[in-house]
Image (cartoon, rainbow, N blue to C red):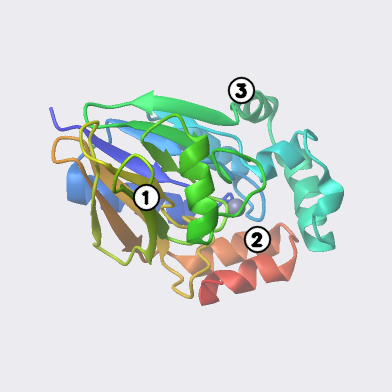
Amino acid sequence: MANNILIISDIHANLAALQAVVADFIAQAGQPSAVWCMGDIVDYGAEPNEIIALLQQYPTICVAGNHELAVLELEEVALFNPDARKSVTWTQQHLTSASLDYLRSLPRTITITTDNADFTLAHGSPRDPSWEYVLESEAAADNFLAMETTHGLIGHSHLPIYFKMIQMDNKHAGVGRAIGEHDDVLKVGNYQTRERLLVNPGGLGQPRNGDPRASYIIYDVESATMRYRRVAYDIKATQAKIRAAKLPERFAKRLERGT
Ligand code: ZN
């Protein structure tokens, strides 16, 4: 049986985007054998319970993002701007008790092993799962040192960005940085190779690299490849739900700009 894993992050309660991603994944790779999610499944959008229900239809493993932790009051909401605080309050008022139980069950990091490699899943970064934005090679290099696994998967910046570390010898390593464009393929290293990856699949429900399409990755375990995908979805439907819920307008507006 094919072993294809759906890798996603930062859904932010955007059901139309998640549905479009699942449909694209199935058209490309068949049913996912697993879903790996790096958190921020709720907040900003108006459909948090629907997202949790959809994720629970699949064998999903997911870590908590800073928005889950804010909703659960496990992190300081005062660090959020006023619109974001409004959204946290709205989400707290609308989550069912079953959804809250699901959010409470999410750990901050997960390590998982496949035939090719092992992975650390974290929202921000392996060394600071709740808050660090890994945007530059220096921060990535520090995280490669902090990780016990060969590879890492992150979210939080909503950017489809990846870092590759190549170990030249015992003392010297180089870290490169690139943006994953639609259909770009990354070769996943194995335990023998000296290449390691730290990969962000991009923002599924609120992309921020100027492309409004939902962003995700197909991980084909047999061929040891990860492929970036961008998928158009019904942005107007999601905006209408955000407006009907009286969530701050900026969370609707930014979806059409991909910022
Ligand atoms: Zn996020």
Above/below status of 198 relative to 61: below
Q: Can you identify the residue that label 1 sits on?
A: 173
State the SS at label 2. Answer: helix
Location of residue 105 in the rendering, given as x and y in whole percent from the top left corner: 61, 22
Residue 56 visible: no
Amino acid residing under circle 2: Ile
| Mark 3 or mark 2, earlier in chain | 3
Q: Residues within 10 Å of mark 2 (few under 14, many from 20)?
A: many
| Mark 1 or mark 3, earlier in chain | 3
Q: Residue at x 37, y 48 (%)?
A: 172
Which mark is nearer the camera, 1 or 3? 1
Q: Can you identify the residue that label 2 sits on?
A: 242
Residue 105 disc label: 3
Amino acid residing under circle 3: Ser
Quadrant of image for the C terminus: bottom right
Amino acid residing under circle 1: Ala
Determine the CA span between mark 1 and mark 3: 37 Å
Location of residue 252 in the rendering, given as x and y in whole percent from the top left corner: 63, 68
